[in-house]
Amino acid sequence: MKALKTMDTAGKPDEALAKIDAVLARARKTKGIDRLDMIYAEASRANALFWLDRYDEALGIYHRLEAELESGKYPMTPDRAELVNNIGSLYSSLGKLEEATRYKLRALDLTAQTAGPESIEYASALYGMALVEFRQGEPLKALPRVREALRLARAHANLTGDDIEQPAIFGLSLAALLIQSGDTASSIEPAREAAVWAETHLGEDHRVTMAALNQLGASLSESGLFAQAIPVIRRTLDLRTKAYPAGHQDIAFSLSALGFALDNSGHKDEALPFYERAAEIFENSNTERKETVGATAIGQLARLAAWRGDKAQSLVLREKALQVGRKRAASAEHPDVLLAEVNLAREYIANRRLDDASILLDHANAAFRQRALDANFRRLCGLIFAEQIAAARGDVAGALTRTVQILAPARARLLDRATPRGEVMRLAEQYHFLFVQQARFAEAANDPAQAFEALQLANLGDLQSAMSSLAMLRDGNGAEATEVIRRYQSLAADGARLRRTLNAQVAAGKGDTVDALNRQLAEIDAHIRQEDARLAELIPGYSLQTAVEPASLSAAQKSLAKGQALVLFGQDEDGLVILAVTADKAVVAESAIAPRPLLDLIKRMRGSIDLGLVNNGAGGFDRKAAFELYQLLFPAPIRQAIKAAPDLRILAPGGLAALPFSALVTQAPQGSDDAPAALRSTRWLAMDHAVSVPLAAVPLPQREGGKREVTFAGIGAPVLGQPVRLATRTALLLRSGDTSTKALRELASLPGAADELRAMATAFPGKPALLIGADATEAAVKAAPLEQASVLAFATHGLVSGAFRDLVEPALVLTPPDQPSETDDGLLTASEIAKLRLDADWVILSACDTSAGDSESAPTFSGLARSFVAAGARSLLLSHWPVRDDVASRLTLDTLKGAGKGLSRAEALRRAQLAILKDSKVPGGAHPATWAPFVLVGN
């Protein structure tokens, strides 16, 4: 009987209820049972009913027992205080927050008196009070309570071995609260610790273990680590599907989480059925629990409808999401309700229902002012949508001015050297949409200078390296650098901790402590900037790799000569914002197209490329898609602006960078798509423009090469698996996220790569340095005197970070060692490339995936380009796809020869491409898969 008091009723509540009922049935037939033991056994029965969502039954038992304890004048004990706490938890789940608050505050007081402030009972009361605060719409206020509860629960479980589910419950809740407060990166550690603890102590089929795994997946997703999140969430979904009946809410949580991860990793079509099933379960749930997740799931469906371009369906779903949120939320200020209001306001603005939008935004923005810091993404969205209303009512200039002010905290956080470099990448992705909107206001206000800065900030994650700060800050730079790295990371951790504390104090309205915290943060940030400057002195390429400051329009125009143009792109749900800059003018234009139709056009064009690769240039090329893309990417005002600019520099974000711009079609195509003569007579963009991709809006500083003999070094053809086409797409271990040496050996070898490198080497005087096959190891590359080569060629696979779970930065594949080590694991990563000593006029990467990834959210040029520039390269030729052996050497050598004769590098590449296109002796030469694989990157 006494054992029932500490029974785990959360893991498998149905089994627990059956056991409790059996014990109680025997106890009622047995004389001499202490009534107090019976009371707490019945309380355990109510606990099991609570976990089964049978709230009315549980509440009736709790109140009956409470009344009996009061009337019987039983002494106040920790068990009695826990009963009070459980009543508060039940009221909280029912959304009756006033009653919940009353019971929770009483429970805190009673447990402090009876069990003490270091007890597990006090931890449970703290946690319960935090959940009430969260449901009241104050997640930041709840954070310190959950942190303290988690500390107490871990100490108690480690000491006694009891209540072992509590550290996992509190830990996964802490992770969820950190996400709600905007600190997604910090949510991963407590989520991972909760999952490990639960699986170790409770087993994989325990309810809490499954919840912790689901939270870990959500934390990884919210931090942009989708490739890591997807397998975790799939496993959770499998476990829950086995454990629960169809239609259980916990299954819906996993369905929604998996949809989110797939959605944001560029696989929206695959995500849709998971969202739909989750929304269906949440809507049909008859649970008494006040959950707002149904509103979130419906909101995700609305976003996908907008992505497809179905504005009518998006509006209907946004209205439904808010309705469900308000119905289920315990407070009108619940974060999910506020988000639903902001999102519906955006739909109303698009439908010119400005007054309706204003009402929603007035409420949401007032709430966010009280509950979020000025750089919080949701708060910024609400404020920017309010400026959309002002602009729609005619105050365009005012809307732009205020938007610049509103986004100033976001801009400052992005550009401050005190912001850890890895955090910059995450923030840049989050703020992307907001800066695109600023560019739209700038266009409407005829302010191209503001549009230019806004589009640079919108694409910041693409313009700078894809490397994280931890990837860059590795040992191997000397003792002093190692110590500076340690101080930098320690200061960054202190800064993150203080910012979390500041968030909580703002939410609690404690202005007296905010000023002191801000002073401490300012001091820490100043020290971080000092250490950052020292790292720039000690680590080769560090400053160049992590530079993010946008250029001014005037500086960009001064860097452009006559006949040169720079084109920048920004993308959101409404379409594209395009800015063309020449030495004497800047023109902004828009193309209205939803992301899905644009992605479909890109996939059609890239699909034609893939077919051409398989057939060696035979078969058709979808010129209609290429022409439609050209019209969208270069609308009439942009076409006019660049008409007199044969030298075209393009900065495009994400999936757009996967486009071979040279193969866009500039006039309506004639003839058959699979006829070589028709393909040769097509008006390709390459006919009129030499295309290149700068690393920034203004050329990066670099070391100038002096007069010297041209020398060649070639590296590639690593020893891998059986050769197949489109190798990285068929390597199963790699696609699952594994980047071990075993997975690398599964990757297909490139049998033509060795011949390609030898053919290139014959064009240069002197003895070439060749590392081919078994010699092409990471250790050999790092030891080679590569600074002696003026032309450096890699013929191997390139892997894009984000596409592979264990790859935090992009890398080139080399021959995997038998015994991998920290310095030789078969992958030459971007941070390792940056540390090479190069003095190369050219770096050539001809294989596959060394340009951009193939999904909608793929990072642009994967950080490899900036890494080689940081190491000392002046220009790069990167391939969008595998290059045919008989074409690779000709394209690269003709480009090098043309540049050697005085042509610009972009013009030399253009002429080499057109020579292949026009040469009827080259099999399949008229197909873009053959002549347009390379893109020029660099100054």
Image: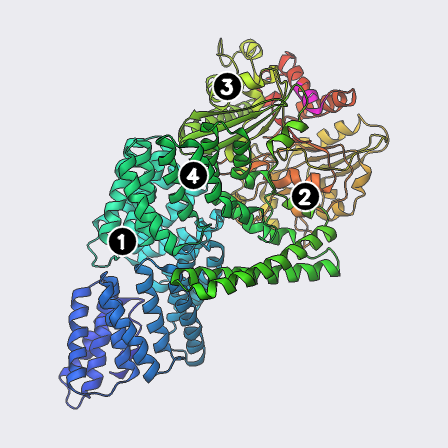
Question: Which quadrant of the rendered structure holds the N terminus?
Answer: bottom left
Residue type at mark 2: give it. Answer: Leu
Q: Which residue is mark 1?
A: 332
Range shown magenta: 904-910
Say what secondary structure mark 2 lies in: helix
Residue type at mark 4: give it. Answer: His
Is residue 909 covered in magenta? yes
Q: Is residue 320 left or right of residue 379?
A: left
Q: Which residue is mark 4?
A: 267
Q: Which residue is mark 2?
A: 544
Q: Tell me the crowding category of disc 3: few under 14, some 14 to 19, or many 20 or more residues within 10 angstroms, Cα based.
A: some
Task: Tell me which numbered mark, 3 or 4, is placed earlier along the sequence.
Answer: 4
Q: Position of residue 670 (x, y in %)?
A: 49, 9
Q: In whole angstroms, how far apart are the C-alphas of marks 3 and 4? A: 33 Å
Q: In whole angstroms, how far apart are the C-alphas of marks 1 and 3? A: 46 Å
Q: Is residue 497 left or right of residue 555?
A: left
Q: In whole angstroms, how far apart are the C-alphas of marks 4 and 1? A: 33 Å
| Residue 640 visible to an observer of this rendering | yes
Task: Tell me which numbered mark, 2 or 3, is placed earlier along the sequence.
Answer: 2
Please tell me the numbered disc located at residue 637: 3
